[in-house]
Image (spheres, helix red, strand yellow):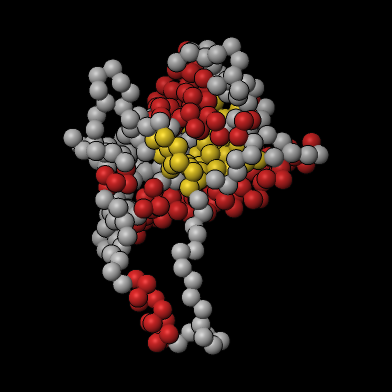
Amino acid sequence: MSLPLEGPLEGLTAIVTGAGRGLGRAEALELARLGARVVVNDFGQPGRDGSGEASAAPAEEVAAEIRAAGGEAVAHTGDVADHEQARALVRSAVDTYGKLDILVNNAGILRDRMIFSMSEAEWDSVIHVHLKGHFNTTHFAAAHWRERSKAAGGPVYGRIVNTSSEAFLAGSAGQPNYAAAKGGIVGLTTSTALALAKYGVTANAICPRARTRMTEDVFAGFQEPAEGRLDPLAPEHVSPLVGYLASPAAAQVNGQLLVVHGGMVAIVERPRVAAKFDAAKETFTFDELDEALSPYYAGRPPNETFAAAEVLGLKRD
């Protein structure tokens, strides 16, 4: 990585959670390349299910990589799913660099299981890290920006980039906890976008497709890159969009959901009404609903999802 003399994020401070590996690491490096000072957060547990002893090494190694390239970065090893540790993370950015301008929420774990086999602990842990983790950091960042805006008497600079997933959009049979958490993150993002717009803050969510430690099973068997070419599922395809959404250039982008992978960005529309039926009288009868809805759904598969290759837009070897 080489850093420009001056980039579009020059003078801005960013937090990236889950930044010790995979997507978060690529995003932290990209923000630094664009000129941001980066707080690299990672709890450092080795298991993708959140298991294993926490370690400072992943966050510290990425922060050191940024500094070695001429950038500014510090490591933070707190657990964003813990409310007070999330508070400390935001305070660390403010204490170290004077303010916070960009928050990229990426930290997450997987505990996959079919709905009929999933334990309460497997459900709670994934919701806890993904959805509560996004809320915790967003809560403290939002309070920081609101206070700054009041002191300034007008809007300030603030950017939030949250990480959702197409597991929420297309369904994922073995990931009810993950799909629910990622759907919740979209709701959190749109609510936050509306609440913070008057303070000058934007909030957007991305659905990235990338080959990382968390998705190695999902993408096993999908096409590998030709020699000398970037993997179409490399996290480096995702990080430029995060850099753009964090920049002044994206001031008009707010409350949006974008799918990104392999040189492609798709803007997802909000759900639209597919069909509408009106009751003949004040309310529907059972027979009336049967006459209206049953023909509409006749001949359609009971669960209109796509095969994995179609959803991913990839081909297996």
Seen from the viewer's position, the closer of residues 97 and 265 is 265
Kindly identify the residue that appears in the image at 62 percent across and 30 percent down: 249
Residue 176 position in % (x across, y down): 34, 56
Q: Is residue 247 visible?
A: yes
Q: Is residue 178 visible?
A: no
Seen from the viewer's position, the closer of residues 274 and 225 is 274
Q: What is the total number of numbered labels drawn onto the structure image?
A: 0
As drawn, the residue found furthest toward the left would be 317
Seen from the viewer's position, the closer of residues 47 and 171 is 171
Kindly identify the residue that appears in the image at 32 percent across and 47 percent down: 311
Kindly identify the residue that appears in the image at 67 percent across and 27 percent down: 98
| Picture quadrant where residue 34 is located | top right
User: Does residue 33 lie above or below 188 as drawn?
Assistant: above
* Left or right: residue 136 compared with residue 216: right
Which quarter of the image is occupied by the N terminus?
top left
Which quarter of the image is occupied by the C terminus?
top left
Residue 213 position in % (x across, y down): 31, 35
Kindly identify the residue that appears in the image at 51 percent across and 54 percent down: 270
Residue 185 position in % (x across, y down): 49, 50
Residue 150 position in % (x across, y down): 78, 41
* Left or right: residue 304 compared with residue 241: left
User: Does residue 35 lie above or below 128 as drawn?
Assistant: above
